[in-house]
Amino acid sequence: MDQQIKPLGVVLCGGESRRMGIDKSLINYHGISQREHVKKLLSPFCSPVVFSVGTNEDDSEEAFPDLPEYAGNGPLSGLLTLHHLFPEKSILLIGCDYPLILQSQLRTLIPENPSYFDAVCYVSGASFRPEPLLAWYSADFCDRIHAELAKNGSNSLKKFLEQAHIHTHKMEKPIHLTSVDRPEDVTRVRQIIQNGFDTFV
């Protein structure tokens, strides 16, 4: 994949983590912090890979806080901030909440024909609702999302996806969509990994 057309990899680290009590992106499941683990997964097919850190303080050169004009809109803040800074890039947006996601599953989100879809994402649950934090977004779609936010204040990425021309993937094994939100979830996921769930390619 040519460097110029590789999507921007964005690891979303800016959540408040109220239920967890600590920064979820810094939890160690694989010998390194979760955000560094996701960066490692994305690096072969995204360029560059950066961290969206919301309002958190972070001195890393790869960390980008939300721009003031987009702040306060949840994950949308990170998406539009990075789109503002890299306007020509499509974006592969990945939340730091999914420690069992595989590299191959992330690579599948990048479409062969990027001009055909607004977005590509996984779906979950019986209703197959889109997972906005496991998704590829075209640059043109990001432009439209920005326009809608400015026009009517709509800031739900899930609703944007539901109304767009998207391609969806159903996860063959739902365990890969395990989201970690509470301390007990961390313990459960570490047990899953310890018990042999250790192939992440």
Image (cartoon, grey):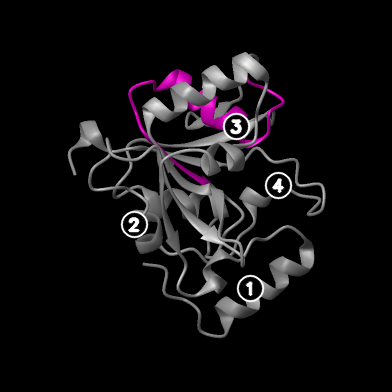
Q: Residue sitting at 60 percent across and 32 percent down?
A: 76
First reached walking from the N terminus: tag 1 or tag 4: 4
Q: Which residues are magenta?
A: 70-94
Q: State the residue position of label 1.
A: 190
Please tell me whether residue 105 belongs to the stretch shown in magenta: no
> For this view, does 119 lie left or right of residue 22?
left
For numbered disc 4, what is the local secondary structure? loop
Disc 2 versus disc 3: distance between alpha carbons?
22 Å
Disc 3 and disc 1 in contact, CB within 8 angstroms: no
For label 1, the crowd category at 10 Å Cα-Cα, with few meaning under 14, some 14 to 19 and many 20 or more, is some
Q: Amino acid at mark 3?
A: Leu
Residue at image point 60% right, 79% down: 192
In this picture, residue 69 sits left or right of residue 8 = right
Q: Nearer the viewer, residue 102 or 74?
A: 74
Residue type at tag 1: Arg
Alpha-carbon distance for marks 1 and 2?
A: 25 Å
- Tell me the residue that label 2 is attached to: 108
Of pointers 1 and 2, the one earlier in the residue sequence: 2
Tell me how far mark 3 sits from mark 4, CA to CA: 19 Å
For the residues bearing labels 1 and 2, Cβ distance under 8 angstroms: no
The residues bearing labels 2 and 4 have C-alpha atoms spaced at a distance of: 28 Å
What's the distance in space between the residues labelled 1 and 4, CA to CA?
17 Å
The amino acid type found where label 4 is placed reads Asp
Q: Are marks 3 and 4 in contact (CB under 8 Å)?
A: no
Q: Is residue 67 visible from the viewing direction of this image?
A: no
Q: What residue lies at 57% left-to-right and 21% top-to-bottom?
A: 148
